[in-house]
Amino acid sequence: PDQEFKIPPDPLRDAITERTRVFVLNSPGNPTGSTYTPEEIVGLAEAIEEAARDVTPDLVVVSDEIYEKIVYDGASHMSIGSIGSIAERVVTVNGLSKAYAMTGWRIGYAAGTGEFGLKVAKAMATLQGQMSTNITSFVYPAIRTALTQCGGDVETMRQAFASRAELVHGLITKIPGFVCPKPSGAFYLFPDVSAHFGKSTPGGKSINSAASFCDALLDEAKVAFVPGEDFGGCGKRCVRISFACSDEQIEQGMARLGEFVAALK
């Protein structure tokens, strides 16, 4: 949490070995709500370039930018695939599910550049050619409409998420024991709740992990979070909170969370 769940360039360099093949970057982030600044993206690109030159020449970056248009609190999105020195080893993946609220329509795409990008595209086409999956026909004109006519709607939604982020972060900072970076993108909080491990609920449930915290919260307060164990790594002490809902629901959910935490012994 003290690094907003972002990896700086030097630890990334240290983590890469000759066996490393793919670095997956997700900014703005799910589950963290954190956004890498342009300066941080440049630093990561430099580390990737050095590693590809000196350690593992076939290193590929997969950049998940599905939340690129949902940024706020002074954040701005920069695609690592736009940096020329590593562009031909970057595959950018994106879609219309988040920014255009077209979640169930499953519209996604990938982009690359140069010979590497062409090679990846052909491989994807080969794989897809042996499958029977596809998006349905009426979705195609909807894609054009979303991309050419709905920019104003996206901005309205972005402003709403910015307001909700302020609201939910302000409320959660009042709950004892939670350590939570302020989100700058997407629509998630990822607080560390480990201060409450070792406690019990009024209903007799033991809290010894993020998963048991979420289970008890759902059973006894009727509030649904996602346990950090589902995301691996540093998430084991954390829970993911989505604020893709109304202000009223946020206020009610945080009130129930506060009462739940206050009752732990």
Image: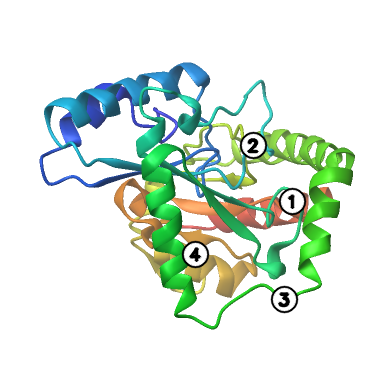
Q: Which residue is mark 1?
A: 250
Camera-side residue of 42 and 239: 42
Which of the marked residues, 4 or 3, is nearer the chain's N terminus?
A: 3
Q: Which amino acid type is shown beneath numbered disc 2?
A: His
Q: Quadrant of residue 89?
A: top left
Give the label, 4 or 3, closer to the camera: 3
Circle number at residue 105: none
Residue under circle 2?
169
Query: How dense is the environment of label 3, judged by Cα within 10 Å: few (below 14), some, or many (20 and up)?
Result: few
Q: Which mark is nearer the camera, 3 or 2?
A: 3
Q: Distance from label 3 to label 2 (Cα)?
A: 39 Å
To which residue does mark 4 refer?
214
Q: Amino acid at mark 4?
A: Cys
Write the residue at 67% across / 72% down: 135
Query: Which image quadrant is residue 73 in?
Result: top right
Task: Tell me the distance, in whole angstroms, between the alpha carbons under discs 1 and 3.
Answer: 35 Å
Q: Is residue 11 left or right of residue 198?
A: left
Does the image show residue 257? yes
* 44 on left or right of 70: left
What's under tag 3, amino acid-wise? Answer: Thr
Disc 2 from disc 4: Cα separation: 19 Å
Residue 201, compared with residue 98, is above or below; it is: below
Q: Pointers 1 and 3 in contact (CB under 8 A)?
A: no
